[in-house]
Each structure stands twice: as structure tokens, then as C-alpha cells.
């Protein structure tokens, strides 16, 4: 089996990843927070059922895992809600990541994820488009971004595959770059030298491939002599900040920030002057799983909203650590799009029930799934990225 990518911390400290599944007491508290179980009410879709299935495999009750066995481990968002709720401190999402690696080594990686892996290996992004297209999002900006073609910069904006390659999400990268320029930040873009961060490969059970792309990205940033990496993608952010140093076995000597942290600091320092004539609006905020529950970034987006005149935030009941997943995580959108869409529909209904006219997120994947859910459910609520709102608010 390939050597797994270990997280920087693995609570409780005395446990190992390999025996973590033994600590599940089957209390079932995870069922109440699992988006998939809450959708199907099927015990086999619950976190504790997956842990029990792993135990059956490890202890020989299932001698030869099948495609159906493997599917149980891949039909999961890896949102971490179960881990947050577990009274025994069992890191259920981490168990499933490692188990996916075991299934992959047995040749049981589901075909949609094989195709995803091939796209990343061949084109260095999740879309299958030529990686030379990574700057197409900049083509229709009023002015060519100053960060294109720079050989050195204090800050590297790591755009991520979704904002760079999916037209629906171009506005996230466009908005953030315009904010960087308004604040006169010395930033650079990697262009085609930016590869997928490696997270999709790692959570598909292919850590060796992930390490290769991680090494490339780190060296590309170092070549620009940057001191800070900032990204609008929570998965890229979490992977760069918490996994790169451990997986590559070295300190990366870079400050890693999410765009909300970076922009909140710019606003605190009065480097982004805001309009006084913003229309009054009520918004709700969706905490992305990788940014919030997994990385602990809850306050920065809310600090941003506090700065913007005439914007009122109303929270959904499931917020911060208890946020309900958007449905777009864990490669589930690639593995089972129908499940992903159903979970997104549940979340967009929760947003609409607040009475807000706009649901904001700080993740281009969340924004995509919530936008699609609002359209398919015929719910009159707008989904947008928080960077778009900040740009609208700047003078």
C-alpha cells in the first residue's frame, strides 16, 4: 500500500491512523449530522456503518472487498461533521480517507475517480482542459492583471482548478485579483505552472501522485521568491497549510492564507476604501467544510461582512462548526452527481428559510453547487462568493 499522507495533527495524540477505527463505540451521534444519512435515512449510509464495514474488512469477515464494498467508502463528502460530533474523538473522515487508499491499491477505485485521476495526471487540472488555459478567466477583465508574467512577487495567488477552469467560477478569481490591485498588493500568478493542489488525488486514495503535484507547486512558488500564498479555494488552502509540510516532510517557509483572511486584514488596515451608497441587503453565509470545520476559519468572512455598509447577516441554524455541507466535497460530485445535487438542495432550502436574498460562501465549489441547487429547486435566492460582494462594495 502507498504511504498515506498523514495530517499535521491526529487527535488524540496517542492513537495511530491505522487503529483509529477500533475506538468507534457505535453510539450513533454521527448520524444526526451526516448530510448523506439525513438524506437517505439508510443505516448503510451512516458514518458508523462505514467504520463497521472497515472493521469487517480488516478483521477478515470480508475476505475480498468488491466494487460495492469500495463504493461505500467513496459515497461520502468527507465533510468532517461526523468527526466534529464524535464523543470518542474518532476522526471518521480521516479513517475513510485512508480506507480509500486501501481500496485504490486493491484496484477498486471507482471509474469516475479513475477518470478524474487521469485528467489530473495528464493535464494537471480537474477539468481535462489544457493547463495552458489556466489564465482564460482573466481575458475579459478591463485590464490585464498585473500579476501575469511576474517573475517575483511577495504574494502568490494560487487560483485553484475550479476558478481557473470552470467559466461559472471565473468571477471569483476576477473579483479577488481586482481587490488585490485596488489595494496595491505585490502579487503574482503562476499561470500554467500552477497545477492541481493535489487534494482530489489524495482523497481518492492516491497519495503518491498527490505528492508529485505538491512538490511541483511548492517549487513554482519558491521560484517567485514569495513570502505568502493566498487562495480563494478552501480545499487548496487547507491542503497547502496543513498537509503540504507533513506530506513533503519539510517546513514550507510560507505564510498560507485564505482570501477571506487576507481581505479581512486589508479592510482592517483601510487599504480597501468602501462605498457609502451600498444598497441595503440581507445575506446569509455558508461555512465551507474545508475552511470552517476543518481549518477553523470562521471569523474572517464575518469580519468582512461587518465592514460592508448596509449588509445584514442572518445566520442559518447550522453554521460554523455545525455547518451543513454544500454537497460538493469529497469528490462526491464526480462519483455520484445525483447524491451531490440532493444534498445541495437541502442546504439551499436552509439558506432560503432565513429570509435572506443572497447566500454567500467563500468557496467556488460551494458557490457552484448552491447556485445550481437554487436553479433546479426554483428557489429565488442568489448564490455568490464573498469576494464578489467585497468588490461591489469597494469605491
Image: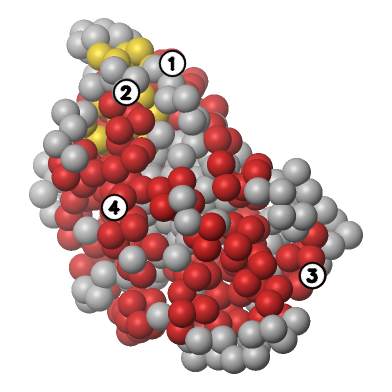
Image quarter hosting the N terminus = bottom right
Tag in front: 1 or 4: 4
Badge 4 crowding class, 10 Å Cα cut-off, few under 14, some 14 to 19, many 20 or more, is many
Q: In the rendered image, which residue does mark 4 sit on?
A: 341
Q: In the rendered image, which residue does mark 2 sit on?
A: 353
Q: Earlier in the sequence, mark 1 or mark 4?
A: 1
Position of residue 192 relative to residue 60, above or below, is: above
Q: CA distance from mark 1 to mark 2?
A: 22 Å
Q: CA distance from mark 1 to mark 4?
A: 31 Å
Q: CA distance from mark 3 to mark 2?
A: 42 Å
Q: Nearer the viewer, residue 112 or 395?
A: 112
Q: In the rendered image, which residue does mark 1 sit on?
A: 306
- Identify the residue at horizontal 28%, vertical 59% (top origin): 338
- Identify the residue at horizontal 38%, vertical 77% (top origin): 113
Q: CA distance from mark 4 to mark 3?
A: 34 Å
Tag in front: 1 or 2: 2
The answer to whether residue 277 shows anywhere in this view is yes
- Identify the residue at horizontal 68%, vertical 77% (top origin): 56
Query: Could you say where residue 172 lies in the image, as x and y percent from the top left?
Result: 28, 44
Badge 1 vs badge 2, beta-carbon distance below 8 Å = no
Q: Earlier in the sequence, mark 1 or mark 2?
A: 1
Q: Nearer the viewer, residue 343 or 183?
A: 343
Position of residue 122 relative to residue 368, above or below, is: below
Q: In the rendered image, which residue does mark 3 sit on?
A: 19
Position of residue 316 relative to residue 179, above or below, is: above
Amino acid at each position: 500500500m502507498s504511504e498515506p499522507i498523514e495530517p499535521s495533527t491526529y487527535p488524540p495524540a496517542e492513537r495511530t491512523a491505522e487503529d483509529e477505527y477500533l475506538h468507534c463505540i457505535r453510539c450513533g451521534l454521527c448520524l444526526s449530522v451526516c448530510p448523506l444519512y439525513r438524506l437517505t435515512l439508510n443505516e448503510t449510509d451512516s458514518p458508523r456503518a462505514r467504520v463497521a464495514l472497515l472493521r469487517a474488512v480488516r478483521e477478515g469477515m470480508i475476505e475480498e472487498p468488491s466494487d460495492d464494498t469500495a463504493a461505500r467508502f467513496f459515497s461520502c463528502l468527507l465533510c468532517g461533521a461526523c468527526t466534529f460530533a464524535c464523543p470518542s474523538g474518532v476522526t471518521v473522515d480521516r479513517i475513510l480517507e485512508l480506507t480509500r487508499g486501501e481500496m485504490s491499491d486493491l484496484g477498486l477505485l471507482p471509474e469516475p475517480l479513475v477518470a478524474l485521476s487521469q485528467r489530473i495526471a495528464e493535464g494537471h487540472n480537474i477539468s481535462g482542459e489544457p493547463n495552458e488555459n489556466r489564465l482564460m478567466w482573466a481575458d475579459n477583465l478591463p485590464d490585464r492583471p498585473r500579476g501575469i508574467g511576474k517573475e517575483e512577487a511577495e504574494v502568490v495567488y494560487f487560483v485553484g482548478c475550479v476558478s481557473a477552469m470552470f467559466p461559472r467560477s471565473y468571477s471569483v478569481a476576477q473579483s479577488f485579483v481586482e481587490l488585490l490591485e485596488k489595494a496595491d498588493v505585490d502579487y503574482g500568478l503562476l499561470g500554467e505552472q500552477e497545477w492541481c493542489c493535489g487534494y482530489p488525488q489524495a482523497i481518492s486514495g492516491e497519495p503518491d501522485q498527490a505528492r508529485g503535484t505538491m512538490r511541483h507547486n511548492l517549487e513554482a512558488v519558491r521560484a517567485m521568491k514569495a513570502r505568502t500564498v493566498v487562495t480563494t479555494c478552501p480545499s487548496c488552502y487547507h491542503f497547502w497549510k496543513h498537509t503540504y509540510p507533513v506530506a513533503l516532510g519539510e517546513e514550507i517557509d510560507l505564510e498560507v492564507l485564505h482570501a477571506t483572511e487576507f481581505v479581512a486584514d486589508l479592510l482592517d488596515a483601510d487599504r480597501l476604501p468602501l462605498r457609502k451608497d451600498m444598497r441595503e441587503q440581507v445575506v446569509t453565509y455558508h461555512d465551507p467544510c474545508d475552511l470552517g470545520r476543518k481549518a477553523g476559519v470562521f471569523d474572517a468572512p464575518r469580519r468582512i461582512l461587518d465592514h460592508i455598509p448596509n449588509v445584514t447577516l442572518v445566520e442559518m441554524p447550522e453554521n460554523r462548526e455545525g455547518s451543513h455541507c454544500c454537497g460538493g466535497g469529497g469528490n462526491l460530485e464526480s462519483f455520484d452527481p445525483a447524491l451531490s445535487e440532493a444534498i445541495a438542495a437541502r442546504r439551499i432550502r436552509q439558506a432560503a428559510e432565513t429570509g435572506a436574498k443572497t447566500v454567500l460562501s467563500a468557496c467556488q465549489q460551494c458557490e457552484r453547487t448552491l447556485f445550481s441547487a437554487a436553479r433546479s429547486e426554483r428557489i429565488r435566492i442568489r448564490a455568490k462568493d464573498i469576494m464578489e460582494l467585497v468588490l461591489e462594495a469597494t469605491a
